Image (cartoon, grey):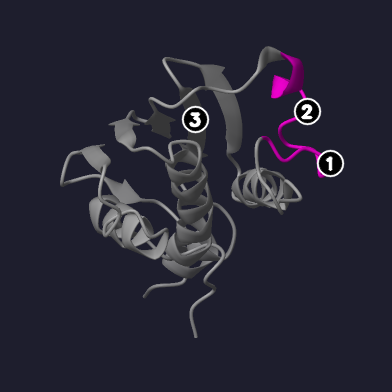
Amino acid sequence: HRDTATDEIGDLRAILMDSCEAAGVVEHRGIDILLDVPPTVELPQSPSRMKSVFVNLIANAAEAMPGGGIIRITAMDTVDRLRIEVEDNGPGIPPEIRDLLFELRVASNKKNGLGLGLMLSRQTVRELGGDLWFEPALGARFVISLPRSVSGPADRRSESKD
């Protein structure tokens, strides 16, 4: 039995491609996906939970660009952190709501949205020891930072090998 919250690892490129498909942007004419992720980068933990975060960020980016545009996803791997950026070249996020993005009441330019996706996405990333934040860019850029090592049950399991 695997503890999916702590000891899964996965191919980040494959997870991001699956996330683009799940978000509906693969079939969307007019939206180009630029995936700048080295093939050797692995997601250190919980690919299934992180996929839901990626799907939300990618779907939000696509929704912000109804006439089409570019979604660029990059990953930078360091010794202790993995940084993933999801950036679009849409209209961006108005300065007056940037500080409120991760609160329930905000749903920027969404007809029926409650803003729940960003709040839950940040909560998921923080539960995995990382963080999620917004940075101004040409459009909107959301940054995920995750620890490279997984603590908890995975560490105890590796110690018990005889």
Q: What x and y, as percent, mark residue 126?
A: 65, 44
Q: Is residue 153 left or right of residue 115?
A: left
Extent of the magenta region? 96-108
Q: Quadrant of the C terminus?
A: bottom left
Residue displayed at 38% across by 37% down: 67
Residue 100 image label = 2
Q: Secondary structure at mark 1?
A: loop
Residue kind at label 3, given as amino acid type: Val
Question: Most extreme residue toward the front, as rendered?
Answer: 67
Q: Is residue 106 magenta?
A: yes
Looking at the image, can residue 132 be seen? yes
Residue topped by disc 1: 105
- Mark-to-mark CA distance, 2 and 3: 16 Å
Looking at the image, tell me whether mark 2 or mark 1 is earlier in sequence order.
2
Packing grade of label 1 (10 A; few <14, some 14-19, many >=20) is: few
Q: Is residue 100 left or right of residue 95?
A: right
Q: What x and y, as percent, mark residue 129?
A: 61, 43
Looking at the image, tell me whether mark 2 or mark 3 is earlier in sequence order.
2
> Main structural element of the magenta stretch: helix, strand or loop?
loop
Residue topped by disc 3: 143
Closest to the observer: 50 or 110?
110
Residue displayed at 52% across by 59% down: 52
Please state which of the two labelled residues, at mark 2 or mark 3, is closer to the viewer.
2
